[in-house]
Image (cartoon, helix red, strand yellow):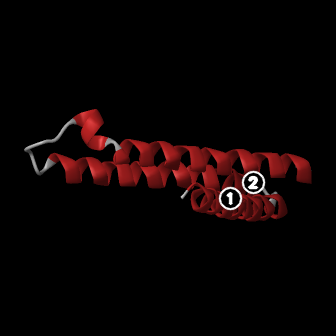
Amino acid sequence: MNKAKLLKLAIANSLGVVIYITLIALIMNNGNKIFGSSDNNLIAPILFLLLFVFSALLTGFLVLGKPLMLYIDGQKKDGVNLLFYTGTALFILLILVAILLIILK
């Protein structure tokens, strides 16, 4: 794979993670409005833990899936580079979101 394709894939995967996290944060922030309050104290922890496991699966796939496939297929340098680019893109998005939140505050 060429560098431009790896960078595009890294940015797309990083944006996917950020969009997913944003949607989950919005749902959790408005949980009482969306789902109402519950008298059953067992449902909330179960749903939270299921969401936690699903989030780990989804974000792990977005961040590690393709780099691991490339590495196993013998394209070790591309796999490592894609993982590095994805991590870098996530870090840049983290900084941008933090700056945006500071500005909006």
**Image quarter for residue 16?**
top right
- Graded by Cα atoms within 10 Å as few (under 14), some (14 to 19) or many (20 or more), the crowding at tag 2 reads some
Q: Name the residue under label 2.
A: 70
Q: Which residue is drawn at 13% across and 50% down?
A: 42
Q: Nearer the viewer, residue 70 or 94?
A: 94
Residue 64 in view of the camera: no
Q: Which residue is drawn at 29% across and 52% down?
A: 48
- Disc 1 marks a residue whose amino acid type is Leu
Of the image marks 1 and 2, the number of the one nearer the N terminus: 2
Helix, strand or loop at mark 2? helix
Residue 32 in view of the camera: yes
Helix, strand or loop at mark 1? helix
Q: Which residue is drawn at 16% across and 41% down?
A: 37
State the mark number for residue 96: 1
Question: Percent from the top left, x then y, of residue 67?
Answer: 71, 56
Q: Is residue 74 left or right of residue 12?
A: right
Q: How far apart are marks 1 and 2 (CA)?
A: 29 Å
